[in-house]
Every structure is written in structure tokens, then in C-alpha cells.
Image (cartoon, rainbow, N blue to C red):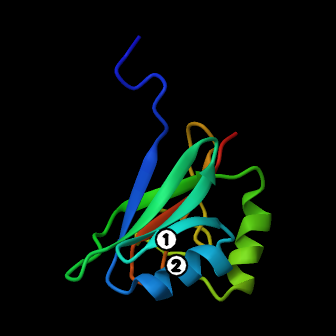
Amino acid sequence: MSLLDRARPIAFVLSRELAALKSFYRDVLGLRLIGEDPYAATFDLGGGATLRLTAVEDHAPGPHTVLGWQVDDLDAALERLAGAGISCDIHEGMGQDERGVWTDPGSGTRIVWFRDPEGNGLSLAQFR
């Protein structure tokens, strides 16, 4: 048995403006808020995993993905993102389509990247 066999994962996304980011994850992405204190808002990610949006006054988002989800229907998810006013990142030279979808030539996995209001990188992937 490993040290973490029965442990439940907790993901952390940092935030300068916790209230605004909490609203995005709850109201736009549809995650269920399960707890909150002056330092963090905690969401249910499903499967026993949680997300803590953690207040960090001087947070500066990095260029890479910090959190992603596997989806069954990427096209439907893209429609919902577009309906919420969210556009996907286009990375020069990657060969993404006009919506920002990149298809892995080896596996056929389709991936998009987008950002939360603070610039944290998020992704959606549909595996083939």
C-alpha cells in the first residue's frame, strides 16, 4: 500500500480576487461550492477530488495549464464556453482549428485551453 492509496486529491488554483474567481468557477463552470473561509473557497470536483481557490495577494498566473477536465463531448463543452463568453487560447504553430481545438495526431485526443478571469490556464480534453 502506498502512502496515498486512500487519499483524496485536492487541487489548488491561486487567486488575487477570490470573490470574482469563486463566481466564475461556481456560476460559469458550474462547480458546486462546498466550503468557504476568508482564505479559500472549496469546490467539489467529483470522484472525491476537491478544488481550493486560495487567496494569494501577489499571485501572477503562469503560462501553463493548472487544471483540466476530461469531457465526453468537447463540441458541446465548447458551445457552453462560448455561450458564457469564453474563448479558447490559440497557440501559434500548434495547428489548432478556428475554435482552438488541437487534435493529437497520434491518439486523436482533442484538447482546448482557456483561462479563468485571473489568467490561470484551464483545459478540456476529449480522449479517443
Residue name at image x 38 percent, y 87 percent: 17
Q: Is residue 108 above or below residue 21?
A: above
Q: Distance between the Cα atoms at labels 2 and 1?
A: 10 Å
Q: Residue at x 52, y 56 (%)?
A: 68
State the SS at label 2.
Answer: helix
User: Which one is nearer the viewer's eye here, 87 or 20?
Assistant: 20
**Residue 29 in the image, given as x and y percentages of width and height:** 65, 72
The residue tagged 2 is 22
**Image mark for residue 36:** 1
Residue 9 relative to residue 76: left or right: left
Q: How many marks?
A: 2
Identify the secondary structure beneath mark 1.
strand
Residue 92 appears in which quarter of the rendering? bottom left
Say left or right for 104 vs 60. Answer: right
- The x, y position of residue 43, in whole percent, is 56, 62
Of circles 2 and 1, which is in front?
Answer: 1
Is residue 111 visible to the viewer in this orientation of the structure? no
Q: Residue at x 41, y 82 (%)?
A: 18
Looking at the image, do the residues carrying marks 2 and 1 touch, with CB atoms under 8 Å apart? Answer: yes
Q: Position of residue 25 (x, y in %)?
A: 57, 74
Q: Residue furthest front?
A: 37
Earlier residue among tags 2 and 1: 2
Q: Is residue 90 among what the camera can see? A: yes
**Is residue 7 depicted above or below 76 in this figure?**
above
Q: Position of residue 124 (x, y in %)?
A: 59, 59
**Amino acid beneath label 2:** Lys
Image quadrant where one finds the N terminus: top left
In this orientation, which residue lies closer to the viewer: 97 or 24?
24
Q: Residues within 10 Å of mark 2 (few under 14, many from 20)?
A: many
Identify residue type, mark 1: Glu
- Tag of residue 25: none
